[in-house]
Amino acid sequence: MKTKSTLFCLLFAVCTNTCISIYAQAVNKQDSLALVDLYNNTGGGGWEKSDNWLTRPVKTWYGITVSGTRVTKISLSNDNLQGRLPASLGNLVNLTYLDLTSNQLRGSIPYSIGNLVKLNYLFLPYNYQLSGSIPSSFGNLVNLRALWLASNQLSGSIPVSIGNLVHLTELNLSNNQLSGSIPSSFGNLIHLTYLWIGNNQLSGRIPSSIGNLVNLTSLDLGENQLSGSIPSSLGNIVNLVQLYLGSNRLSGGIPSSFANLVNLQELSVGDNQVSGSIPASLGNLVNLHGLYLTNNQLSGSIPSSLGNLVNLISLQLNDNQLSGSIPFSLGNLVNLAFLYLNTNQLSGSIPSKLGNLVKLQELNLNHNKLSGIIPPTIANLQERLYALDLSYNRFTFTSMQFVQQTFPFAIYGNQARVPVHQKGNTLYVSAGGTLKNNTYKWFKVGQTGNTTIKGDSVFHPLQSGKYFANVTNSVAIKLILKTDTLNYVASSLSSTTTIASSEDALRQQDKTNLFLVYPNPAKNILQVQTNGKASFTLTDQSGKVLFTRFINGKDEINIANLAQDYTI
């Protein structure tokens, strides 16, 4: 009995040892040690998910895929990994997928990752603290389909060896601190559909070889320091849906070859030094949702062909040197929500067809030379429009009364100065608007105070000098319309300049006895202005005296209840 018991125990021990040996060999030792290094170096105890790590077989660890005895996939995105990537990751030579997106990794990317020649997908974006350069060894990863290193602090130049990755379909290096030029070897990556290297410090020219990437649907080179002209070869990439070249130092014109990019939905060339005219052929890009050409040196007129872009949601041509009128055809852009034409040299009136843009939310036309009447059709925009800026143009109260009543949120102040007109000894100004709503304040340069006239701009200075006026309107309350300064020289009265005078003044032409009466004709208030004390008599056409009043300097006489054909 004792012998049997001893044999049982021995057999049990053998079985136990055999089982332990099987678990230990389930995953390649080199692979399992590399994973343990990853866990220890990145604070595995603080990960969001670390199910079974270091306590159960490797194939059960959260985020790990094992094929046979080798680790083939690591997927630990958004898992709060903190720390540095161990060089031993380069031992996972059967790895095809590595995703450590959106963690808090820091330090440099190990050069040894270049050993992972079976990798198809490498994702390290949105860690924000990965630094150092992109290892040139990445050029060994010839089976890569996708390489994402965006939103980190990577610096240095882009390795030329990236051009070896001829199977790449996605390359995203954006939002780093990469410098130097774009390697012309990128032209080898003919299977790319996404190339995003924007928001870096890249300089030099855009390689014409980028035009080889005919499968690209999205190209982002924006927010760098790229210079030189835009290669016409970009017009070869006919599958492009998004093209971002904004915020660089690009110069020259917009290539006419862009007319080939008929699948484009977003075109951004803003914030550069691009010059010349806007090609009329851009009107071919009928799938565009956004056209951004802002802050360049574009000149000439806005092509009427842009009215073909009926899918546009945002049209931004502001901060250029565009001239001529606003095309009526822009009224065809019925899906437009944002229209920025401000800070140009546009002139003429606002087309009535803009009233068709009933989806418009923002309309900015400030800092131009627009004038004339605001078309009443603009009232059609009331439902959705919440931002309207018409300031720094040449509008008068005629239009601004309507704007204030229709769009009380509108900005329309600081219109161009209006001229002061002189006829004989009379000054007047055309400020538009309903006359009774206007108040004119006349100023003489070098003197304090002003002469205020309500409802009529006619002013009769008593002295020579430089005069100007500020005009306000009781409806268009956000605008003070200012005039030019006129150098006024008082002249002797004549039959063509005298509005009204005393009998003595007409007979003797003695300026000391002169007094002036305005406006003429007058409907309500008659202004009487004298050099001193005077007797003022108002008669009708038969000579009947209606009243006599003594005036000392200046006075107002209410004639609202009198007929309007009296002589003075």
Image: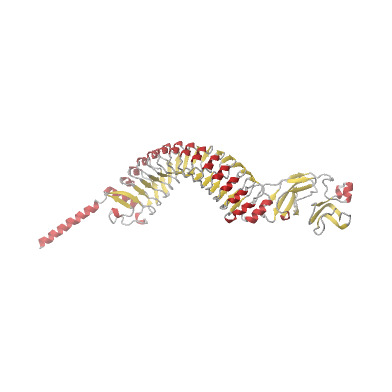
Residue 441 in the image: state x and y as whole percent. Answer: 73, 52
Where on the picture, by quarter, is residue 209? Answer: top left
Q: Nearer the viewer, residue 261 or 496?
A: 261
Image coordinates of residue 399 in percent, x first then y, are: 67, 51
Work out whether 6 lies above or below 86: below
The answer to whether residue 12 is visible is yes
The image quarter in which residue 173 lies: top left
Q: How many marks?
A: 0
Residue 4 screen position, x and y as percent = 11, 61
| Residue 185 spot, x, y in % from top left | 41, 37
Residue at image point 34% right, 50% down: 74
Residue at image point 54% right, 37% down: 253
Quarter of the image where the N terminus is located: bottom left
What's the image's color scheme?
secondary structure
Viewed as shown, does residue 542 lie left or right of 437? right
**Residue 273 visible to an observer of this rendering:** no
* Residue drawn at 59 percent across, 51 percent down: 356
Query: In the figure, is residue 415 to the left or right of 55?
Result: right
